[in-house]
Amino acid sequence: MGRYAAVSESPAPLTAEDLSAFAVVSEAVIAPEGDRVAYAVRRMDVTANRYRAAIFVSSADGSPDAVAWTDGAADDATPRWSPDGTRIAFVSDRGAVPEGKKRAPKNVFVVDGPDTAPRQVAAFADDCGDLVWLPDGSGVIVTLKDPAPLQPDDAPKVYDRVRYKSDDAGMLDLRRKHLWLVPLRGGDPRKLTDGDWDDSQPAISPDGATVAFTSNRTADRDRNTVTDIWTVPLRGGPPARVTTEQGQYGNASWSPDGAAIACLGTVDAVGAGARNTRVWRFGSAGGAGTDLLGTWDRTTGSRVMSDIRGEPAPFPPAWTRDGRILFIGSDQGTANLYSVDQRGGGVRAETVGAHQLVAATVDRDVRCFAGVLATATSPGEVVTGQPGGTMRAITSLNRGLLSARYIAEPERVAFTGADGWAIEGWLLKPRGFDPSKRWPLVLEIHGGPHGAYGHSFFHEFQVLAGRGYAVLYANPRGSHGYGDAFVRACVGDWGGKDYEDLMAGVDMALGLGWVDRDRQYVTGGSYGGFMTNWIVGHTDRFKAAVTQRSISNNISAFGTSDIGWHFWGYEMGGAAPWRDAHRLVERSPLTYVTNVKTPLLILHAEKDFRCPIEQAEQLFVALKVLGKEAVFVRFQDDTHELTRGGKPKNRIDHARRIADWFDAHP
């Protein structure tokens, strides 16, 4: 348990191993009539080193009557109510494992009730997703890759385009993803879209005649990051583009009369991650769009980060019967339900609170919603409510574990960063806190750089607090939730004023009087790993550091990251290895490796294609050649998502190593 395990008071500290005891819900789907909620409860099976999930149904009014509709023997996900509310379609790996494969593909199943066996309604060779019902209940639409060509597994992989790998899919075989209709009343699955592009996020028009979807069908689609809303007749015919071929638009939602489509997006695809994502309205036949949010200077989406689950799927805008559109938005470390007038303007909060509304769905009449609500002290429970009303929790999946462990309540802190900017953060006090003593402090730095910390649960933070560390986490410039200018402020300046913001936060904590100046520690992942590497090359104030899935060399990241060729070009102010290379070198932590005096633990997944493991290799080798204290841990068979959805054993080991490393450097 480490150096601070001797604290005797109850409750016990949260441990790395406790991660396996959490029940995690990522979405809750309300039935068409608004009376019931379906949700998949996912748990770790550490022995098998995998996840299993069962689908449950509860009454929307909070009655304690949760009933399992599937048995949890497989990983059942994405429950979707049939239009008449009698059946649930879902995707699962509960099918047979094909010869030569390690697992079964995720196919479509339908279950008629809690006492019936799910039946498989499709037998695709690859995972399918984006599951939606047809309005008449006669079938479902899914997305699926084109069939794999017949060739030996050890055949050379030949690429002729820049998008040849992906962190979530690995080394690509260049097959495209398209929409498929799976009939439930007889007949074979039918392909709805085709071509040398990827199609996703299907949404059915109210009359069931047309499908809207997201695709990049631009001529230069291999090199740009454009996404558009398209429509295609369900019975066949040429697709039609709705949006502009210039921005990033997705998550289409039809108006009740089918005349308009609302979606989420940015007017310019370049650097879209560093901009507020807006709610847009387009005519379903195309034409000029309207940014409905007006002067509301925040972003849509549930942007608050957590290590309990990956980034939530966006909630498509929902048209209400009273002339408004619902959406999830993020503001200063919170995520809540908002609405905007269908003609534009008049944004108002429909839920309020220091929490993260992770996901939401609405009933047929858009009068009630169900969602998943997380806080800094709870990884998430299913809630129901009405827009503008109060929410009620209808599950208490983790109450037993949380009540038996020390869970630190965050205290909001505010401090002045570079240029006098106001910076927000939170502080967890350590288990057994006594203000008359001096306590070690861990600075945690989020990824992105355009992510955001806030009112959501972090297992890693709570493990450290249980070990006796104060934990400081903050949103320096570049973070979402503070306006468009704030989120763009680190572009072209990684390691500049964002670094100053973070150091100002540590100085603020030292000024509290109970933080031990000689026991300061730092860690972070992705951009937070970049910043950890940057910090140890620019100050020796930290006793030890842990860099997670990090970046050390901007030159090589440009060509080895799955997004490097466009992401680094924008984030580094337009620099490229053949243009302004000095800028990339100047802002690379590797450039300052001779300055490093801080013992560094390097944690990285071998299949990370977002921040490739060669970034960790370069840093580690340089440190060892220079005689510095460094340890390199490589996690097999995991990607950049290791800490949020990786192999259970790896996630537990990863959390344990961070705390152990700090304990080993008192």
Image (spheres, helix red, strand yellow):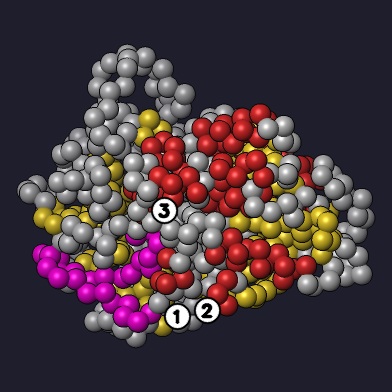
Left or right of 150, for residue 600: right
Q: Earlier in the sequence, mark 1 or mark 3?
A: 1
Q: Is residue 128 visible?
A: yes
Q: Residue furthest bottom?
A: 346
Q: Where does residue 350 sit, x and y in percent of width and height?
A: 45, 79
- Give the residue displayed 63% in from the left and 38% down from the top: 603
Q: Quadrant of the N terminus?
A: top right
Q: Where does residue 563 sit, x and y in percent of width and height?
A: 38, 44
- Give the residue displayed 66% in from the left and 68% down from the top: 504
Question: Which of these two is toward me, 235 or 309?
Answer: 309
Tag shown at residue 352: 2
Q: Where does residue 634 sit, x and y in percent of width and height?
A: 61, 31
- The relative height of residue 580 versus residue 615 in the rendered view (above or below) is below
Near mark 3 (Cα within 10 A), the count class, few <14, some 14-19 or many ≥20, is some
Task: Give the label, 1 or 3, closer to the camera.
Answer: 3
Dot 2 and dot 1 residues touching (CB under 8 Å): yes
- Give the residue displayed 63% in from the left and 44% down from the top: 547
Magenta residues span 272-296
Kindly report the distance in space between the C-alpha atoms of the residues bearing marks 2 and 1: 7 Å
Kindly report the distance in space between the C-alpha atoms of the residues bearing marks 2 and 3: 36 Å
What amino acid does circle 1 point to?
A: Ala
Task: Give the label, 2 or 3, closer to the camera.
Answer: 3
Give the residue number, with chain letter if any, for mark 3. 572
What amino acid does circle 3 point to?
A: Met
Give the residue number, with chain letter if any, for mark 1. 349
Q: Is residue 36 visible?
A: no
Q: Earlier in the sequence, mark 2 or mark 3?
A: 2
Kind of element beneath mark 1: strand
Question: Which of these two is toward me, 177 or 23?
Answer: 177
